[in-house]
Image (cartoon, rainbow, N blue to C red):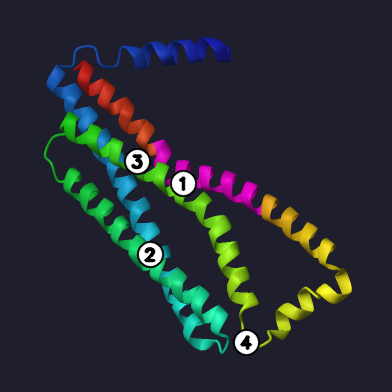
Amino acid sequence: MDLDQFKQQLNEKLSTDHNGRSGEEIAQMLGKKTFSIIEKLKRSIQYEILFGLIGMILFAILAFSTKYQSIRTYFGVAAVFIFLFLFLLNYLLKKTIKLNQVQRPVISNLTNYVLLIEEYMKRYFQFTMAMIPICLFFAGYLGYHEKKPIPELDKIIDVGQLGFKLVLTISIIYLISFSIGIYYFTKWYLHKIYGKYVLELKNCIKDLQEN
């Protein structure tokens, strides 16, 4: 038996696997699959909350341990943003847990949940892209108005030696490269922790509607 014949027989077996099963049995099977996907989404949100807490603590430590006002302000504001973001993640986690406590999947609840996650992913992406120029401008503003000189930064960028045009060119190239990198990374990240599970939930909803 060659590989093509094996694949054909396997597909035929899978396509007839539900024969002889009642609609109730099929619904229960789909329900188990649905709750398994929701459980994976729950773990993804829990991981985000954990990483957010770690990031907030690290930023807070940096904010309170540095002697430079600009660095203290930058990381202090970042810590506050993460703290507020954790409330949104906690809300998503509660919705996920509540949905997984239902004895049987309710199509309307699943649909609303998928819409909620998709809206979250959309806003997450928009917020991330918007924060790139804001953070860079904010960092530049704080660095420019820093009263104490920062020797570490002065060694990296010496405008007097490199020249203003060269520094500006390097900064623009860095900003463009960084933005493109963040764009694709955010797309990949959101699909990895949310998007692929949302697609699976949509397929489950479709199957449930057919049964």
Tag of residue 50? 2
Q: Specify which label sits upstream in the sequence, 2 or 3.
A: 2
Name the quarter where the C terminus is drawn: top left
> Looking at the image, is 189 positioned above or below residue 31?
below
Q: Is residue 11 left or right of residue 41?
A: right
Q: Which residues are magenta?
A: 178-196
Report the predominant secondary structure element of the magenta stretch. helix
How far across and down, in percent of the image, does residue 132 sit? 56, 56
- Residue 52 in the image, given as x and y percentages of width and height: 41, 64
Nearest the viewer among 161 and 196 is 161
Residue drawn at x 18%, y 35% is 109
Q: Nearer the viewer, mark 4 or mark 3?
A: 4
Q: Which mark is residue 119?
A: 3
Q: Closer to the N terminus: mark 1 or mark 3?
A: 3
Residue 158 lies, in percent from the top left, at 81, 76
> Label 3's element?
helix
Mark whose residue sits in front, 2 or 1: 1
